[in-house]
Image (tube, helix red, strand yellow):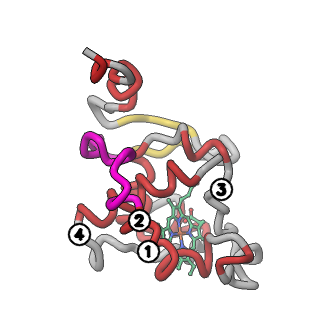
Amino acid sequence: MSSAKGIPRKLLQLTVVTTLLVYGCGEQPVTYPARRMPAGLMQDVAQLQAGQKLFRSKCASCHGKPSEGRSERAAFFNPPAPDFTGAHYRETDPAYLYWRIEVGKTVEPYRSQGSVMPAWGVHFSEEKIWQIVAYLQVRAH
Ligand code: HEC
C-alpha cells in the first residue's frame, strides 16, 4: 500500500493532549489546544492556493518577503513580525500555528509583549485557517 508512506510522520504531528513547547528564541513555554490538520491538506494544490491567496491579502504586509509588499514596520514591531520562509516553520506544530493565527495578540505572553498580531479567529473559518497553516508549512524552506 503506497498510501502508508508518510503516515508515521503525520502521527508524530498529532498532538494528543495540550502540548508544552518552547518556540522562537526558546524563552517562552506556551500551551495551546491540540488540533489535527485535515488529512492530505499539504498535498492539495487548490487548498494551498487558497491559503496563498489569503496570506497575500491578509498577512504578507507584515509577514511577507519584501517582494510581497512587506510593511516597512514589520521588522520594527516589537516583537517583530516573523518571515515565514524560515525553514523551521516546516517543522513547527501545525496546532501551534493554527492557535497563533486564531488568537493573535489576545493571549499571554504576546499581549504583554506588545504584539500587534491580529486575532483572525473571528474573521476566518476553521477551513481557511488550516489552508493558511498548510500554505505556510509548504512555503517554508
Ligand atoms: C499588523 C501586522 C500583522 C499582520 C497583518 C499579521 N501578523 Fe502575524 N504576527 C505579527 C507580529 C508582530 C507577530 C510577532 C508577535 C507575536 O508572536 O504575537 C506575529 C506572529 C504571528 C505568528 C506566530 C509566529 C511564531 O513563530 O510564533 C503567526 C503564526 C502569524 N503571526 C500568522 C499570521 C497570519 C497567518 C496572518 C494573516 C492571516 C498574520 N499573521 C497577519 C504581525 C502581523
Q: Secondary structure at mark 1?
A: helix
Of all residues, the one furthest to the front in this rendering is 2
The kind of residue tagged 4 is Ser
The residue labelled by disc 3 is 85
Q: Which numbered disc, 3 or 1, marks the residue that appears first in the sequence?
A: 1
The residue labelled by disc 1 is 53
Q: Residue at x 66, y 41 (%)?
A: 26
Label annotation for residue 49: 2
Percent position of residue 129, x then y: 33, 63
The image shows residue 126, relative to residue 5, as above or below, that is below
Whether residue 108 sits left or right of residue 50 in the image: it is: right
The residue labelled by disc 4 is 125
Membership of 35 in magenta stretch: yes
- The part of the image, by quadrant, that contains residue 11 is top left
Asked if ligand 1 lies within 8 A of label 3, the reply is: no
The kind of residue tagged 3 is Thr
Residue range of the region highlighted in magenta in the rendering: 32-48
**Dot 1 surroundings within 10 Å: few (below 14), some, or many (20 or more)?**
some
Q: Nearer the viewer, mark 3 or mark 1?
A: 1
The kind of residue tagged 1 is Lys
Q: CA distance from mark 1 to mark 4?
A: 15 Å
Percent position of residue 40, x then y: 29, 42
Percent position of residue 17, x then y: 28, 32
The kind of residue tagged 2 is Gln
Q: Nearer the viewer, mark 3 or mark 4?
A: 3
Asked whether 131 or 43 is in front, the reply is 43
